[in-house]
Amino acid sequence: MEQYTPLIYVGAGVGLVVVILVATRIYEKKRREGWLLAARNLGFEFQEDAAPLMERFGSFKVFQQGHSRRVRYALVGRHGAAEAYLIDYQYTTGGGKHQTRHRQTLCVFRSPKLKLPHCFVRRQKALFDLLGKAFGGQDIDFDDDREFSKSFVLQGVDEEATREVFDWNVRRSFLQLPSHDFQVEVLGGTVLVNPGRSIKPVQAADHLDWGHSILRIFG
């Protein structure tokens, strides 16, 4: 019996891999169907493996992280007066047994009314950002607004222009946003909102509204 034990383990391992592959295929099929339905309900165009979107928004941080970058699905349309994109995006960090796949649903708006400098803002992570500052990581602070400075990391290619954009009213608006993690990056007429996670297709309309509320902060 002992001579067959290794074969039992090998068979169990192969069986587990097959189960995972089948489950992944079923999940992706349902997710694709969900995005198709969401596009139909929103009146948006559905795109799959939309590599041109990575080129269009390639100057944004999220499209420069990791490797094996891929837009799996994208919904393209309009929300109010702005072009709107919901992008189901993934990239990988690390390699071999230590690689991690990151999947995030980005919300992007393009408005001809905006002319913003390239800047980036996200919720502050106490220990991580304290170490970042110690090693020279940029974080634009405001002496007259300690609440915002303690709550957010703000970075900008042009610090003076970034300070002008993040005036008192803009900073108050960000402080009133829900406290969960998110990242916002702006450049020219484009505002990219990254919740740091993937959303379910049934949440598409709510996610667009949430992103649009951040777009309105910038005017």
Image (spheres, grey):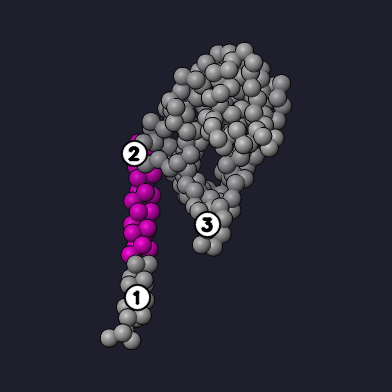
Query: Could you tell which of marks 3 and 1 lies nearer the N-terminus?
Result: 1
Asked whether residue 95 is drawn in magenta, I would say no
Question: At label 3, which amino acid type do we have?
Answer: Gln
Q: For marks 1 and 2, give the CA distance.
A: 40 Å
Q: Which residue is mark 1?
A: 9
Question: At label 2, which amino acid type do we have?
Answer: Val
Report whether residue 165 is seen.
Answer: no
Residue 212 lies left or right of residue 22; in this view the side is: right
Identify which residue, 166 or 112, lies in the foreground: 166
Q: Which residue is mark 2?
A: 202
Q: For marks 3 and 2, give the CA distance.
A: 29 Å
**Helix or strand or loop: what does disc 2 sit on?**
helix
Residue 184 lies left or right of residue 30; in this view the side is: right
Give the x, y percent position of residue 157. 70, 30
Q: Residue at x 39, y 36 (%)?
A: 204
Span colored in magenta: 19-43
Query: Could you tell which of marks 3 and 2 lies nearer the N-terminus?
Result: 3
Q: Residue at x 37, y 49 (%)?
A: 31
